[in-house]
Image: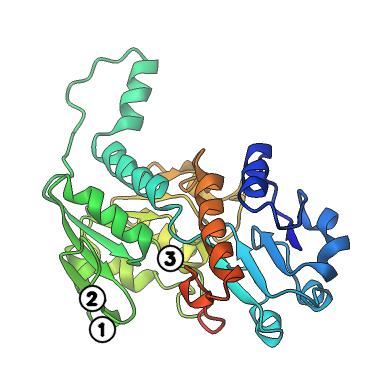
């Protein structure tokens, strides 16, 4: 039996049932509703935030979890590994909206969009607003997975130079230069824009902090669309106050929702958005397409053909 604790649109459910008429599906809107059938479930569809060690222990028949998001921060990996449960996710489905968000924010900051809108409200005609171009600039990307490579691809349309960081220093598409941890200073020192797309792991906890900001250009713009925990927020605030960097665009934070008392809300050189860079009306369709392809392979006992299998030890 295939159980879903993820709230899915009715047309999505109908499409899945039509494609796999031989399967028994039970669709629910949350784990509280789905819990009664957890013990019988062979496959679970989840957003990845509703599982605990105790629930995994109840799921005695579980063989595979499809997490229909990319983030796996809250997954009980040890419990799942103990029961030898296969884990896949929807990595790659966010690349289009998140890359578009990144390019749009780079353009908004460079072309002073917020100031222009304010001038319009005040009926102010000011042709001396300082405009800059992103064309020909250097873009540093922390994390060269599907999202990072898509950002780099779009940046190429603006004739940008691209530097990417990953742990092993392996080549990645549309990146002119790749650096590992040994060479990361070069990325910080030479980039006009730095985009953080790092996942949340033990290795990336507060990965970007005071040292990184001190190496960046004073004119640099730092954008975080990865995870809030990968940046030391206090040290970022300090760097912005001391004008070590020019501006920061933040879509993710150490604590979400961002507390009302956070100084980030009112800083002139900060743009705050509420963790929405990955939102798209095509989200569920893209995630379910990955699930359906994987289900076909799973039923043929060809797990080696399944995509986005997550290693327990890596966690992303």
Eye-nearest disc, 2 or 3: 2
* Residue 45 position (above or below residue 246): below
* Residue 228 position (above or below residue 272): below
Q: How many circles with numbers are drawn on the protein?
A: 3
Eye-nearest disc, 1 or 3: 1
Q: Are marks 2 and 3 in contact (CB under 8 Å)?
A: no
Residues 40 and 164: in front is 40
Can residue 245 be seen from the camera position used here?
A: no
Can residue 165 be seen from the camera position used here?
A: yes
Q: Which residue is mark 3?
A: 235
Residue 154: x and y in percent read 24, 48
User: Which quadrant does the N terminus fall into?
Assistant: bottom right
Q: Secondary structure at mark 1?
A: helix
Q: Is residue 314 left or right of residue 145?
A: right
Distance CA(mark 1)–CA(mark 2): 7 Å
Distance CA(mark 2)–CA(mark 3): 24 Å
Q: Is residue 129 left or right of residue 79?
A: left
Q: Which residue is mark 2?
A: 179
């Amino acid at each position: 039996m295939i159980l879903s604790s993820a709230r899915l649109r009715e047309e999505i459910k109908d499409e899945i049932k039509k494609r796999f008429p031989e399967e028994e599906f039970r669709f629910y809107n949350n784990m509280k509703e789905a819990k009664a059938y957890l013990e019988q479930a062979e496959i679970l569809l989840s957003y990845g935030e509703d599982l605990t060690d105790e629930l995994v222990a109840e799921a005695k028949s579980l063989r595979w979890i499809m997490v229909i998001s990319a983030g796996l921060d809250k997954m009980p990996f040890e419990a799942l590994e103990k029961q030898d449960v296969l884990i896949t996710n929807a990595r790659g489905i966010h690349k289009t909206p998140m890359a578009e968000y990144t390019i749009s924010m780079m353009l908004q900051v460079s072309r002073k969009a917020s100031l222009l809108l304010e001038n319009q409200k005040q009926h102010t005609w000011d042709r001396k607003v300082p405009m800059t171009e992103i064309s020909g600039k250097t873009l540093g990307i922390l994390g060269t997975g599907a999202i990072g490579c898509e950002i780099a691809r779009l940046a190429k349309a603006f004739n940008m130079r691209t530097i990417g960081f990953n742990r092993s220093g392996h080549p990645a598409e549309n990146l002119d230069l790749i650096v590992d941890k040994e060479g990361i200073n070069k990325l910080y020192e030479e980039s006009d824009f730095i985009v953080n797309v790092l996942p949340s792991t033990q290795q990336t906890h507060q990965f970007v902090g005071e040292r990184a900001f001190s190496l960046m250009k004073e004119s640099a713009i730092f954008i975080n669309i990865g995870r809030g925990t990968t940046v030391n927020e206090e040290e970022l605030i300090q760097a912005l106050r001391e004008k070590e960097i020019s501006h920061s665009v933040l879509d993710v934070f150490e604590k979400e929702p961002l507390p009302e008392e956070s100084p980030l809300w009112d800083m002139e050189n900060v743009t705050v958005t509420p963790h929405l860079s990955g939102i798209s009306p095509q989200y569920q369709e893209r995630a379910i397409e990955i699930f359906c392809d994987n289900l076909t392979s799973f039923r043929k006992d060809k797990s080696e053909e399944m995509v986005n299998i997550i290693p327990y030890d890596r966690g992303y």
